[in-house]
Amino acid sequence: MRNFSHPALRTSIEARAAYCSPNDVAPVLVAKALAAGGAELTADGALSVRTGAFTGRSPKDKFIVEDDLTRDRVWWDNSARMTPQDFERLLADASASMTDAEIFRQDLLAGADPRHQYAVTVLTPSAWHALFIANLLIRPGDGTCGETPSEVTIVHAPNFKADPTRHGSRGETVIALDMSRNIVVIAGTLYAGEIKKSVFSLFNFHAPLNDVLPMHCSANLNDQGETALFFGLSGTGKTTLSNDPARPLIGDDEHGWSSDGVFNLEGGCYAKTVKLSAAAEPEIFAATRKFGTVLENVVLDPVTRVPDFNDTSLTENTRAAYPINILPSIANGSVGGVPNIVVFLTADAFGVLPPIARLTPEQAVYHFLSGYTAKVAGTERGVTEPQATFSACFGAPFMPLHPSVYGRMLAERLRQSGAHAWLINTGWTGGGYGVGNRIALASTRRLLNAALNGEPGWG
């Protein structure tokens, strides 16, 4: 068992090693999730779960510990502060709340480049959450482990309710990050996306110190091994458009851009499944039918247990979490060279932006910093229809540093690489939401392929 140095972790978890289930494989976790209740198998063997009242992230409940490391570095206009004392109480109380529970531990890796890799341990009383994060991070053996990876510990206590007066939280739900010790506490929410995004947030804080640009984007390769990046918020098409059998996938959501090229932070995909079909998105559809895939808030037929991806009665933010290696075309080692194409995806809700536009480097950085899109229904709590939003770096909730830090790094990367930049609108045309029509996926793919392949007039 890994030696957790923090007293709260030692007392509540390490001392109970006999009750810990270390690195259980998918069949064991599926069986235990079914036995615990609240989960069921689909007709094809995927694990279907529900996340209750929380069907999206809770960005207003995210806190960063203010200490000597973070005080003058964190973008506090975007991040809530938590005192070290409040965090200590939260960590101790959340850990103690799991005293009588079986703890499922997953020892994983984040970062396909071994020079920029983190060893991540997730501790949770929920078997399906353990399966979820095992699907999404790099499983030892799937990637090359660095000699001295940084240590990250995530204490996931979904049933523990924070106390604002004791823990300094906003309410009973809290996601708190201690950047100095790389400890995360998640409490009061079953939404599994909070686990994966906490790893991304830690990476986004530390990566620039190592001259790595952290990016909320997907990435793939052409047959010459050239890399393309796809920036965009959830719901704008990062996963869908980067899944192309003709272009091996590096990753669908979180990456780092070093001086040598691009590497995936994760080892899996977290795809939206609303209105998913085999005809439009065959690779993702096939992934939802694999044993061990976790389907979040997808409604099943009560008799056949076949998923109904058109049923949004629970949420529009239905998701599938699966290992990247079950896809038919993936990049070797989840790495790629220096990008030659950078695509910014936006879902314009007002029918103003064109379907595609070529950007100068200055325009690309401006668009990166402004991050205009429309929040897609269900991605966050309270969002029921597209809303115009500006999210710096296409991922402001996960960017602990000021956007100018990431913007300067992108400008330098574009200058050094000479990459071409494109803006692609996956939103509405012929009028805004409720008047016009959302641009057809087939049309977007045709425009994208023309840009990626350098067809005449598109280079």
Image (tube, rainbow, N blue to C red):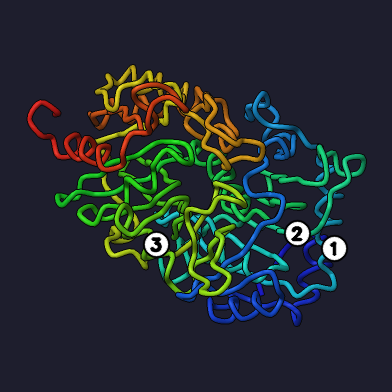
First of labels 2, 1 by sequence position: 1
Q: Mark 1 points at which residue?
A: 97
Three-letter code, disc 2: Ala
Q: Name the residue under label 2.
A: 157
Q: How far apart are marks 1 and 3 (CA)?
A: 33 Å
Q: Residues within 10 Å of mark 3 (few under 14, many from 20)?
A: many
Where residue 415 sits, quadrant-wise, is top left
Quarter the N terminus occupies: bottom right
Tell me if residue 33 comes above or below residue 312 in the rendering.
below
Task: Name the spot of residue 286 as percent of width and height, x first.
Answer: 36, 65
Q: Name the residue under label 3.
A: 324
Contact between labelled residues 3 and 1, with CB atoms less than 8 Å apart: no
Contact between labelled residues 1 and 2, with CB atoms less than 8 Å apart: yes
**Is residue 228 among what the camera can see?**
yes
Three-letter code, disc 3: Ile
**Foreground: 434 or 277?**
434
Q: How crowded is mark 2: few (under 14 residues within 10 Å), some or many (20 or more)?
A: many
